[in-house]
Amino acid sequence: MNTPSQIPDPKVLETLVCPVTRNTLVYDRAAQELISKAAGLAFPIRNGIPVMLLDEARRLD
């Protein structure tokens, strides 16, 4: 489970956009991912830091 230091700052999450589509992202707290519905990708959040690299993104089914 995430400790408070690992939870991303909500203000930071509001400013992030998908690097592929430039659309907004949806925060999935349970999976600790940022979801780009338009691109069909999920970007991981590790230790409270969003990893916005295409190589690290997971394809959505």
Image (spheres, grey):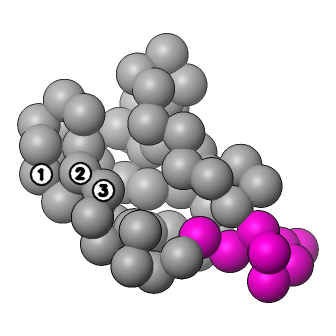
For marks 1 and 2, give the CA distance: 5 Å
**Could you tell me residue 38's position as x and y percent?**
14, 45
Residue at numbered disc 3: 16
Say if 30 sits above or below 35 in the image: below
Q: Which residues are magenta?
A: 1-8
Q: Secondary structure at mark 2?
A: loop
- Among the two numbered marks 1 and 2 on one chain, the one whose residue lies closer to the N terminus: 2
Query: Quick check: marks 2 and 3 in contact, CB under 8 Å?
Result: yes
Q: Give the residue number, with chain letter if any, for mark 1.
A: 23
CB atoms of marks 1 and 2 within 8 Å = yes
Q: Nearer the viewer, residue 10 or 31?
A: 10
Q: Which mark is residue 34?
A: none
Quarter of the image that includes the C terminus: top left
Q: Amino acid at mark 3?
A: Leu
Amino acid type at circle 1 is Asn
Can you tell which of label 3 and label 1 is closer to the viewer? 3
Q: Main secondary structure of the magenta part?
A: loop
Q: Residue at x 27, y 64 (%)?
A: 15
Neighbor class of circle 3 (other Cα within 10 Å; few <14, some 14-19, many 20+) is some
Residue 14 at x, y percent in the picture = 30, 72
Q: In the shown orientation, is residue 7 left or right of residue 36?
A: right
Q: Earlier in the sequence, mark 3 or mark 1?
A: 3
Residue 53 location (% of width, % of height): 45, 26
Q: Label 2 belongs to which residue?
A: 17
Q: From the viewer's perspective, is 17 left or right of 34?
A: left
Q: Residues within 10 Å of mark 1 (few under 14, many from 20)?
A: some
